[in-house]
Amino acid sequence: MFDENFLMAVATIGAFLIGEFPEGVAVMLFYQIGEFMQDLAVNRSRKSIAKLMDIRPDYANIKVGEDIEKVSPDEVNIGDIIVVKPGEKVPLDGVVVEGKSMVDTSALTGESVPREVKVGDEILGGFINKNGLLSVKVTKEFGESTVSKILDLVQNASSKKAPTENFITKFARYYTPIIVFAALALAIIPPLVIEGAKFSEWIYRALVFLVISCPCALVVSIPLGFFGGIGGASKRGILVKGGNYLEALNNVDTVVFDKTGTLTKGVFKVTEIKVKNGISREQLLEIAAYAESYSNHPIAVSILNEYGKEINKDYIESYDEISGYGIKAVVKGKVVLAGNDKLMKKENIEYEDVDAAGTIVHVVIDRKYAGYIIISDEMKKDSEKAVRELKAIGVNKTVMLTGDNKKVADSVGEKLGLDRVYAELLPQHKVEKVEMLEREIQTKGKLIFVGDGINDAPVLARADIGVAMGGLGSDAAIEAADIVLMTDEPSKLVNAIKIAKRTRKIVWQNIIFSLGIKGIVLLLGALGYATMWAAVFADVGVALIAVLNAMRVLNVNNI
């Protein structure tokens, strides 16, 4: 019962009882104006999150034979074909089976530039189809789709309170009853003890004391600050699952990255072709593409993509995939070997031992060494920038954990300027390394793990703060993480930390300002120098200024 409404009611009734009618009306009127303004500010903060709610699709156009039926997204099953017309929201996650279009992904990823999708591309619920007609085969039910999970994450984010918010809630719980009894003592004790003191004068002082002491500036502006920080981050394509994680980002000591799909694109590409014994580059690439044409291994796919021409399967007379070694095939009457060092040794072929960061595919035609192809994973454009900026904002240690071979891992680590690199790790080894790194942290600093794959889920859950790549990351990783970067850009982690630091700065400005002004006016009120008007300003005015200051958190455009 000891909330701000109780304090205001006592102050108003008390003012009327001692004949201070204008001031009694002023308390009610200004309190209502203050509440109205606070509601406006809170609603504005909610709008940035409510914008995300607009991505919830209202219907889906499902293909039934030759007809199209408009149904609720809940009624669509996995494997159904849905049609998305220009201007419509994509209702569920799926794969494009027909059509080509530009899609607006900004609601989910924060990316302003539309993305092109074509047959075979994955498309997520919440994207907006811009121009073409798309037929999409549904891969997830509505409850499991990305759009549903995002809405659920954001709606529940405010339930996980930051330590500062919890402190303020506890503070208000004990502070208000203490103030009520202090005001009661102020009204009763001085007239009994001080000679000539009037009850009406001391009751008035006690009422002023009550109005000033109301903690609404803290109770409203601090949760609003964290709520605004979460909303502002979501504008930039960063989903924070709670105020506690936003506050934890202020004390980051170590950032640990996964490699494939996090710092690198996870897309293998031919980076070098070296020919031997008089064969041309084009011939080597063609023969390797034919040899690899039946394999769906990422290495084979990258060779076929580099070749880029139609494969006539009639030219392939026999094909044998030797697990762990490579391919043996007969192409256009020639026996072709394409594989690693182990295949060369197994077949007793003299080959060139290559020291390079990447996967080496040696090619042999009729037992004659023809050359090799180097395939590497491409670095993400902003990986180097992310590591550089993390150091600039005070992160002590940047580390990479990967299951890839040591040579490749060391090469990536060197290019990015990472402090440490651990390679050839299994998922359980990653957890062990994270625990080891946590033990090394001397301060109260936190450890962040950034990953994207299903094998990263245990480490994401184990780290102080787990950060998942949300655009292409696995569902398990997104589920286990505390923060999700919807654009798959590691540099967004720097934005998240900057937003967290700014949020904390604004929250502490409000705490110091509110308590400082209240302390001064409380003292003046107890001594009889502050009127009810000053008391109303110290409550409603301070609350309003604090709320407007908290609204600045939403402005994240320059972060």
Image (spheres, grey):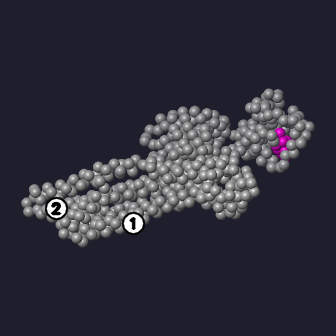
Per the picture, the main secondary structure of the magenta-coloured stretch is helix
Dividing the picture into quadrants, the one containing residue 18 is bottom left
**Closer to us: 249 or 134:** 134
Residue drawn at point x = 61 percent, y = 34 percent: 425
10 Å neighbourhood of mark 1: few (<14), some, or many (≥20)? some
Q: Position of residue 374 (x, y in %)?
A: 75, 41
Q: Position of residue 61 (x, y in %)?
A: 67, 57
**Closer to us: 53 or 197:** 53
Q: Position of residue 478 (x, y in %)?
A: 57, 45
In the rendered structure, which disc, 1 or 2, sits on the residue that comes first in sequence? 1
**Closer to us: 259 or 453:** 453
**Amino acid type shown at disc 2:** Trp
Q: Which residues are magenta?
A: 279-291
Residue drawn at point x = 53 percent, y = 51 percent: 152
- In this view of the protein, can residue 184 be seen by the observer? yes
Dividing the picture into quadrants, the one containing residue 40 is bottom left
- In this view of the protein, can residue 121 be seen by the observer? no
Q: Position of residue 419 (x, y in %)?
A: 56, 41
**Amino acid type shown at disc 1:** Met
Residue 202 is marked as 2
Q: Which residue is mark 1?
A: 37
In magenta segment, residue 221: no
